[in-house]
Image (cartoon, helix red, strand yellow):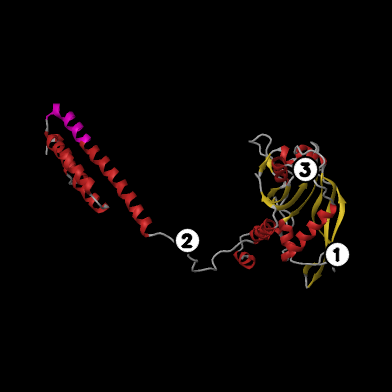
Amino acid sequence: MNPQELENNLDYWLKNINKTTSFKELEQLKSDLLGKSGTITLAFKTISEVSVDEKKLFGERLNKIKSSIEDFILTKKKELEEYSMLEKLKNETLDITLPIKNNKFGGLHIITQAIRRIRNHYLARGFSVLDGPEIENDFFNFDALNMPKHHPARQSHDTFYLKEIEDSLLRTHTSCVQIRTMLNKGANVRMISIGKTYRNDALDATHSPMFHQVECLVVDKKPINIGHLKSELRRFVSFFFEVEDIAIRFRPSFFPFTEPGMEVDCKYFKKEGKLIISKDGDKWLEIGGAGMVHPNVFKACNIEQPAYGFAFGVGLERLIMLKSGIKDIRNLFDTDNRWLKYYGQ
């Protein structure tokens, strides 16, 4: 078949390709035209039979016809693939409202369980539950919290700084969220923040370079005092450890962002090797830090005096370890399936 005859038949072949409704039909047409014994392939073998002057034009016309057929087949193949996918989506829909057959598959990590409990507790009480960026700058992480330039926490042996981004670091506490909230809402804040924080600590049984913090902040133009702080702390500890009768004490301590600042302890005793939080305890256990918001923090957040507020913060992993009798913080980040099943939910 000469090029002229091939060109005359091109429209007919293209129409047949367009009419195909399955991959099998399309592959058969491709084989008939471009396969080893296909019409176009055989036509290329006749080039040697034409004169030298006609070979170039003959080859160009054949290549053009072959390219047209290949392009059309490729386009049709894509159409069939899209159609096949749409049909599959129609016929193989998944009802995500149906319950799973094996409800023993997977579970919530003990940290996730604690975060959800705390979040739901405070949302039910009308608090905002907030988080912010884990990559912070000096202002939100240090300056606004009344930390001077020479403060040890700002040194690289305590903090992870990012070399590629100027004035940036992995936040060392979730207090940054409190600063962002006060800048946004002013002196009308009832919030907690729960999130990851980072310290340049070596990983051992009691330390981790990444851990979660829970912080509470209440700010108002109406007077707020330490009594309010103690009441909220008592309520939080009672809720978390699921114990009604607790005893709390404050020990004076220094934090740049509070005045006064204090460490928070609660009474406990041990029974059968397990720690029990109770007002009848014979020992004191440190659970976190707290204090009244420092006036310089209000100033950095553009909150005019008079303004009042309190804040407290605790390490979530530490509380989980105390409540569940876990002695090594590394267990919380291991992937031992037996451990995960035991504490999972």
Tags 1 and 2 in contact by the CB under 8 Å rule?
no
Which secondary structure, mark 2?
loop
Name the image quarter holding the N terminus: top left
Residue reaching furthest to the front? 222
Magenta stretch prevailing secondary structure: helix
Check residue 54 in the rendering and tell me which mark sits there, or answer none. none
Looking at the image, is mark 3 or mark 2 earlier in the sequence?
2
Q: Among all residues in the image, which is located at the extreme top?
A: 53
Give the camera-side residue of 303 and 152.
303
Where is residue 160, by image quadrant? top right
Q: From the viewer's perspective, is the residue at label 3 or at label 2 nearer?
A: 2
Q: Magenta segment: does it hold 52?
A: yes
Read off the magenta span.
51-64
| Amino acid at the residue labelled 2 | Ile
Q: Please tell me whether mark 3 sits on a helix, a strand or a loop.
A: helix
Where is mark 3, residue-wise?
Answer: 153
Tell me the tag on residue 96: 2
Query: Alpha-carbon neighbours of circle 2 within 10 Å: few (<14), some, or many (≥20)?
Result: few
| Amino acid tagged 3 | Ala
* Res 283 label: 1
